[in-house]
Image (spheres, coloured by chain):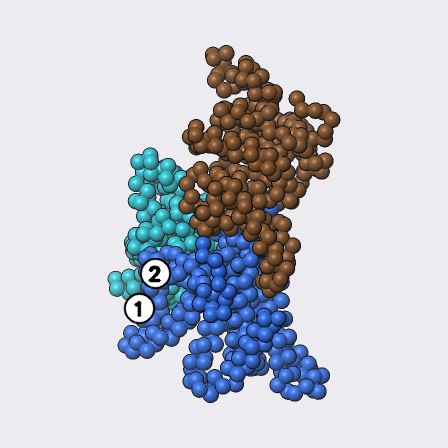
Chain colours: A blue, B cyan, C brown
């Protein structure tokens, strides 16, 4: 009951944010906020695959692309028809209903690809898995390039602008909450055991096959929804946005944050989204910003290989004012 | 049939370049278990070193065979130097750290070379001088064999044989193999593994530099991002053959080169970039260690 | 010899496996009856751990059958075998090093959880009750093994002896009927060995276990095992009560070489 109340509370809060934030905050900052949130979803979901389950995936951009393109096809081709049949609803509701449908479609299609990619993970380990996931991502991209109905090499344009602050905030919060809750559960410990020692995990009754595949499926699901948000925000999807460099970018976020730390993934995703923007203001050295970015990455890895936060996660519940007092150990 | 032969000639010469780059990946992986993502960018540097060298020495104005080899040697030497610097500066401090850290650093170095290259050489493509004037060696209705693919093939085969000699017959080659087999044990046997690792980078980077020149002969448009995709595909070639395995890298490179030109020639050139990865997925699903690779099962 | 009236809990019938031409285990037979504590000994490389790996499904036997409580185990995955009530420890300790002591044991409880993936994300009442129940079980288990104060420590940071104990505690958390211990006393001094013997005997009674034990420390094996099997080059060379094994010339030969006989 308390949980339901919290959900409704957040729902209303996010609706209010959606209504009033654009009036008080500069659009440029809102733009950065939106991009940060999408990267947070990507980083947190990849962290479940790489950090928690220890399956080295370099194909996250592929999941994002599949989710983005599927959802955009849904809203672009099916959306108008659905809205037409829902004409008894207020237009704004019908529109958001279509978007919810697209989000789920994008997430599920990416999850299906995750299932396909997860299967090789049963036979392949470490670097071999990394290169196969990278390869799958590239295959997806080249296939998209060859389908004219979704824009091919020109890119998919005129996607309806359904992404708004409400969806951005809700999905980011949902991703973080769901992944964090999953990680802190019995199933989450099963994911961790696969990362730590597969043979011991099997011997302790953990079905490692299942957990490896399911990590890919869940991670891909959220990445697909991020792709959907991305496409309906920019109103344009282009295959060049989903090269392996995008996958590298997300991997870098979770490594910089500290592999396995959700908190670290969130912070690093925000920092690394804002950093190249911030470097724009450096005036004469602004041409150097990508060089500075890569140098910073190398130096960070040499001086602090465990990432900014290691696998440390702050205990937010400790600061929650209404929690029940706990016995001191 | 003649068209097939034409594709085959192009495929083999293209494949030999993949093989040259793949060798660097596979050797470094052998000694360090590191995917050196910056390797493709060293290949790019090779082309640029050759470009500036041939302009500076005026070789570009009057191409001779001697001039071509001088450019090739210069690019190889310069890339070897860059490879050793990268290894000493970026990877050596991470030797005892988790492999993932080194991998991310490699991505960082790769980004640095690409962005640094864009800053230094400019974003626009440069045109590599034709150091060897193209002549036709054989010509018939459907089959034209020019000297370029032949020279590429001969040069890369010669370099591979040289590499094989170094790895199999010299003391440092034996030390390399020992280090690849077991770094700690090699160190205990008195091998200076740090030098061996640097030497491995030196060899691999020199081969990548040569690859850069050879590619620029056929595709003279060179730009700072040109190493990205060929580098990745060469790595795929190394994995196809079984990473860490030197003959495997050559085999993987050849398979990749031939199948890419065949797909481009007979099916569609836009699918060309996917074939490398499709092959990779299929082969690894059938044989998870690559064609010539072997794996020791984990001891329980 | 145990009474022939009861059904064997574990039965291996002519099990063999070879690695690249080398017969690691050759037509191995074993019957283990409920409540027994049996030792499996033999020189290095005799195939003892391979027998464990066959039983727990890490390796597939090339011939022979393995039955547990009448059920055929051949072809089952390790986790399914564990779910049947069979748990093991490892010779070269395989803890989940970066996780806490408590988490290590909790992972072994995972197969008893009923909650689905969604249930564990939502964390409803049923899940919380289940978690509390398992938590209590773990607390008492850790108490038995003297690890309760260390429950928040990283497993990799524990001293060697405590890591071995934690492995046993973790195996017990799967609620096994049969426990396979692979050299539990390796690296222990005589004092620790004695304590470990007492502990093994005690958990056997308390959890009503059947135990199969690989051990190098003769003191331990002779001290607690009711029956001993001796393995050499993948074949059983002797089988009997500790005092019989002690005198068996074949065993002495296998351990000390021919001249010693």
Residue closest to the eye, B171 or A175: A175
Q: Secondary structure at mark 1?
A: helix
**Residue at image coords 32%, 60%:** A299
Q: Which mark is residue A300?
A: 2
Residue closest to the eye, A114 or C79: C79
Find residue B38 and report its horizontal and vertical position in percent.
38, 58
Which tag is nearer the camera, tag 2 or tag 1?
Answer: 2
**Residue at image coords 38%, 64%:** B111
Residue closest to the eye, A321 or C164: A321
Return the residue at label 1: B120
**Residue at image coords 57%, 48%:** C137
Residue C218's place in the image compared with A170, above or below, is: above
Residue A65's place in the image compared with C161, above or below, is: below
* C29 with respect to A25 (left or right): right
Q: Quadrant of residue B17?
A: bottom left
Q: Chain of mark 1?
A: B
Q: Secondary structure at mark 2?
A: helix
**Residue at image coords 53%, 59%:** A183
Find residue B95 and report its horizontal and vertical position in percent.
35, 49
Q: Residue furthest left?
A: B57
**Within 10 angstroms of label 2, few (less than 14), some, or many (20 or more) residues?**
some
* C137 with respect to A327 (left or right): right
């Amino acid at each position: 009951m308390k949980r339901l109340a919290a959900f409704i509370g957040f729902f209303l809060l996010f609706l209010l944010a959606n209504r009033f934030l654009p009036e008080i905050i500069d659009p440029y900052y809102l733009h950065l906020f939106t991009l940060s949130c999408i990267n947070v979803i990507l980083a947190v979901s990849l962290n479940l695959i790489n950090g928690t389950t220890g399956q080295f995936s370099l194909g996250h951009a592929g999941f994002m692309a599949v989710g983005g393109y599927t959802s955009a096809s849904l809203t672009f081709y099916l959306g108008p028809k659905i809205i037409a049949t829902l004409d008894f609803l207020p237009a704004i509701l019908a529109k958001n209903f279509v978007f919810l449908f697209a989000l789920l479609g994008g997430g599920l299609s990416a999850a299906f690809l995750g299932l396909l990619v997860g299967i090789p993970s049963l036979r392949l380990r470490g670097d071999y898995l990394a290169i196969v996931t990278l390869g799958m991502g590239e295959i997806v991209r080249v296939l998209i390039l060859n389908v004219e109905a979704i824009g091919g090499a020109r890119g998919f344009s005129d996607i309806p602008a359904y992404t708004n602050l409400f969806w951005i905030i809700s999905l980011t919060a949902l991703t973080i909450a769901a992944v964090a809750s999953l990680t802190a559960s019995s199933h989450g410990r099963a994911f961790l055991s696969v990362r730590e020692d597969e043979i011991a995990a099997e011997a302790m009754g953990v079905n490692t096959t299942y957990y490896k595949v399911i990590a890919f499926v869940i991670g891909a699901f959220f990445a697909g929804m991020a792709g959907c948000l991305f496409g309906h925000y920019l109103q344009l999807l282009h295959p060049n946005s989903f090269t392996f460099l995008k996958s590298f970018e997300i991997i870098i976020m979770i490594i910089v944050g500290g592999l396995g730390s959700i908190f670290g993934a969130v912070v690093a995703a925000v920092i690394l989204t804002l950093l190249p923007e911030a470097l724009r203001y450096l005036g004469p050295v602004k041409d150097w910003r990508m060089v500075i970015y890569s140098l910073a990455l190398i130096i960070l890895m040499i001086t602090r290989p465990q990432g900014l936060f290691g696998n440390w996660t702050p205990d937010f519940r400790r600061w929650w004012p209404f929690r029940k007092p706990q016995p001191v150990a | 049939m003649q068209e097939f032969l034409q594709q085959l000639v192009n495929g083999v010469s293209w494949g030999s370049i993949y093989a040259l780059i793949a060798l660097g990946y596979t050797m470094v992986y052998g000694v360090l278990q590191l995917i050196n993502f910056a390797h493709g960018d060293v290949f790019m540097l090779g082309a640029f070193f050759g470009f500036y060298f041939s302009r500076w020495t005026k070789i570009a104005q009057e191409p001779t065979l001697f001039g071509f080899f001088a450019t090739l040697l210069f690019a190889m030497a310069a890339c070897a130097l860059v490879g050793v610097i990268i290894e000493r500066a970026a990877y050596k401090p991470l030797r005892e750290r988790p492999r993932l850290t080194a991998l991310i650093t490699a991505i960082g170095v790769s980004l640095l070379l690409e962005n640094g290259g864009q800053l230094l050489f400019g974003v626009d493509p440069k045109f590599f001088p034709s150091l060897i004037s193209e002549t036709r060696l054989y010509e018939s209705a459907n089959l034209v064999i020019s000297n370029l693919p032949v020279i590429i093939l001969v040069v890369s085969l010669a370099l591979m044989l040289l590499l094989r000699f170094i790895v199999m017959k010299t003391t440092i080659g034996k030390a390399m193999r020992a280090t690849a087999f077991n770094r700690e044990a090699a160190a205990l046997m008195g091998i200076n593994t740090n030098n061996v690792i640097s030497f491995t980078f030196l060899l691999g980077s020199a081969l990548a530099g040569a690859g850069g020149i050879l590619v620029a002969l056929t595709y003279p448009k060179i730009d700072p991002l040109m190493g990205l995709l060929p580098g990745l595909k060469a790595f795929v070639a190394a994995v196809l053959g079984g990473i860490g395995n030197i003959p495997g890298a050559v085999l993987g490179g050849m398979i990749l080169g031939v199948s890419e030109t065949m797909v481009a020639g007979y099916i569609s050139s836009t699918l060309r970039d996917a074939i490398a990865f499709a092959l990779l997925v299929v082969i690894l699903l059938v044989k998870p260690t690559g064609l010539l690779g072997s794996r020791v099962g984990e001891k329980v | 010899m145990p009474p022939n009236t009861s059904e064997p809990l574990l039965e291996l019938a002519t099990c063999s496996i070879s690695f690249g031409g080398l017969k690691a285990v050759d037509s191995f037979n074993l019957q283990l009856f409920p409540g027994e504590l049996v030792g499996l000994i033999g020189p290095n490389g005799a195939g003892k751990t391979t027998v464990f790996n066959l039983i727990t499904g890490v390796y597939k036997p090339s011939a022979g059958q393995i039955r547990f409580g009448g059920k055929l185990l051949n072809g089952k995955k390790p986790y399914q075998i564990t779910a049947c009530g069979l748990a093991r420890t490892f010779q070269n300790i395989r803890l989940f090093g970066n996780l806490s002591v408590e988490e290590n044991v909790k992972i072994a409880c995972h197969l008893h959880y009923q909650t689905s993936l969604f249930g564990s994300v939502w964390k409803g009442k049923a899940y919380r009750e289940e978690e509390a129940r398992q938590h209590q079980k773990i607390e008492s288990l850790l108490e038995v093994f003297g690890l309760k104060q260390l429950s928040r420590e990283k497993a990799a940071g524990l001293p060697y002896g405590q890591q071995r104990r934690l492995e046993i505690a973790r195996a017990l958390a799967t609620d096994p009927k049969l426990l396979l211990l692979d050299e539990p006393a390796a690296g222990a001094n005589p004092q620790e060995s004695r304590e470990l013997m007492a502990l093994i005997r005690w958990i056997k009674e308390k959890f009503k276990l059947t135990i199969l034990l690989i051990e190098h420390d003769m003191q331990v094996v002779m001290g607690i095992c009711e029956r001993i099997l001796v393995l050499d080059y993948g074949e059983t060379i002797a089988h009997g009560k500790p005092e019989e094994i002690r005198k068996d010339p074949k065993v002495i030969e296998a351990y000390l070489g021919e001249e010693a006989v």
